[in-house]
Image (cartoon, rainbow, N blue to C red):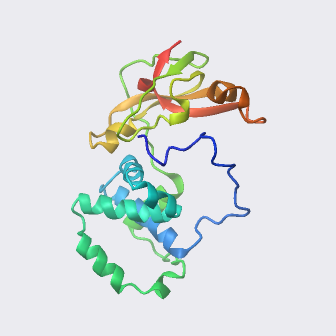
């Protein structure tokens, strides 16, 4: 999707400066938001591509003004209202009832986890597999030169803007995985071959590419690629 979120590799935004000893969450509510997101997915309310798509659809000013997890909050409010899980009125009422003091401390893990809580913990720490069987053979193998399509989708896409219409080399075949675009659009699990494609910095940004970053690897679905 061509949105404000897709700013990787663009000029004029300055360097990425990592925070020294950055904690997983800067505030307790961020961890709770992460937990809510996992609970929604485990409960079958939404999937990760739907979550990402909801974030991508936020207004540009909102996206840039918010912190990372604030965008999660805004996205899930819209997502859960759209799916009929809650109403906007219920969200406003609940927000007015909450005390900021109650959200200052990180919750402690219960001594005896329920079966559902154990499943949530497993997903939090290990994730959930997305590889799926597929009868169609892969078109490409490691070492094959490929070129990305120049796709400007108005929907969710896993093809970053800075690698569109660029030439690279297949570095690794991941197998078939659930296609994120299909999941984001509510079409279920449609497996597609997935590859790690290696691009030189020169092929992406030309002679002015940043020194010290000779290659970039991007995981791309087969329908984003064509043979060279």
Query: Of residues 71 and 114, which is closer to you in this image?
Result: 71
Give the residue displayed 39% in from the left and 56% down from the top. Answer: 59
Give the residue displayed 49% in from the left and 87% down from the top. Answer: 101
Query: Of residues 8 and 191, which is closer to you in this image?
Result: 8
In this picture, residue 78 sits left or right of residue 30: left
Give the residue displayed 49% in from the left and 48% down from the top. Answer: 5
- Height in image: 137 above or below 209? above
Query: Of residues 176 and 152, which is closer to you in this image?
Result: 152
The image shows residue 18 at horizontal and vertical percentages of 70, 56
Of all residues, the one furthest to the right in this rendering is: 212
The image shows residue 190 at horizontal and vertical percentages of 33, 33
The image shows residue 135 at horizontal and vertical percentages of 35, 22
Image quadrant in which you'd find residue 113? bottom left
- Height in image: 163 above or below 71? above
Q: Is residue 34 visible from the viewing direction of this image? A: no
Image quadrant in which you'd find residue 118? bottom left
The image shows residue 84 at horizontal and vertical percentages of 21, 62
């Amino acid at each position: 999707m061509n949105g404000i979120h897709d700013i990787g590799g663009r000029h004029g935004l300055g360097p990425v400066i990592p925070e020294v000893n950055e904690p997983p969450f800067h505030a307790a509510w961020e961890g709770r938001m992460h937990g809510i997101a996992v609970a929604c997915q485990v409960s079958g309310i939404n999937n990760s591509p739907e979550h990402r798509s909801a974030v991508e659809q936020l207004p540009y000013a909102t996206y840039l003004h918010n912190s990372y997890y604030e965008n999660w909050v805004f996205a899930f409010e819209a997502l859960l209202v759209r799916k009929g899980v809650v109403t906007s009125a219920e969200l406003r009422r609940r927000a007015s009832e909450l005390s900021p003091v109650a959200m200052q401390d990180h919750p402690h893990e219960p001594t005896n986890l329920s079966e559902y809580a154990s499943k949530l913990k497993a997903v939090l720490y290990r994730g959930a597999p997305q590889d799926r069987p597929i009868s169609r053979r892969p078109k490409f193998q490691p070492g094959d030169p490929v070129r990305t399509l120049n796709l400007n989708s108005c929907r969710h896409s896993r093809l970053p803007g800075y690698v569109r219409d660029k030439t690279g080399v297949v570095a690794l075949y991941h197998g078939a995985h659930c296609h994120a675009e299909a999941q984001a659009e509510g079409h279920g699990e449609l497996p597609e071959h997935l590859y790690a494609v290696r691009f030189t910095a020169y092929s992406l940004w030309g002679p002015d590419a940043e020194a010290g970053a000779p290659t970039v690897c991007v995981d791309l679905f087969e329908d984003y690629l064509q043979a060279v």
